[in-house]
Image (spheres, rainbow, N blue to C red):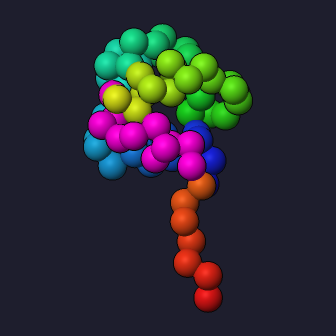
């Protein structure tokens, strides 16, 4: 799962709109939308931090690969 998929999944689980997350994060809707569609591939850390805070998760929850147990 990539950054965009994690953002979208977390936002939808919390039943938030893109507009609400962007507002809480202090970024434009255009910026948030571009990130969620994987059009912006290298966001500044402060942007990621704002989005993570807006979603109530650590930055690592959006950026770190999920740990998958080995079979």
| Residue 26 as seen in the image, left or right of residue 3 | left
Q: Which residues are magenta?
A: 54-64
The percent coordinates of residue 69 (x first, y second) are 55, 78
Residue 41, position as x, y percentages in the image: 70, 29
Residue 14 counted in the magenta span:
no
Residue at point 59%, 55% (across, down)? 65
Dominant SS type (magenta): helix
- Residue at 34% x, 29% y is 53
Image quadrant holding the C terminus, namely bottom right
Compared across the picture, whether 69 is left or right of 52 comes to right
Position in image of residue 2 (x %, y %): 63, 47
Query: Which residue is at 45% across, 26% downward?
Result: 49
Q: Is residue 59 above or below residue 9?
A: above
- Asked whether residue 19 appears in the rendered view, the answer is no
Q: Is residue 27 visible?
A: yes
Quarter of the figure with residue 44: top right
Left or right of 24? Residue 34 is right
Percent position (x, y) of residue 15?
A: 29, 41
How many badges with numbers are in the image?
0
| Placement of 4 over or under 44, stated as above or below | below
Q: Quadrant of residue 68?
A: bottom right
Image quadrant holding the N terminus, namely bottom right
Question: Residue lying farthest bottom?
Answer: 71
């Amino acid at each position: 799962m990539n950054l965009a998929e994690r953002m979208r999944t977390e936002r939808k689980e919390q039943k938030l709109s893109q507009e609400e997350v962007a507002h809480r994060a202090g970024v434009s809707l255009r910026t948030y939308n571009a990130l969620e569609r994987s059009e912006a591939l290298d966001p500044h850390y402060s942007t990621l931090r704002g989005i993570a805070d807006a979603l109530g998760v650590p930055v690592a929850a959006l950026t770190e690969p999920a740990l998958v147990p080995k079979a």
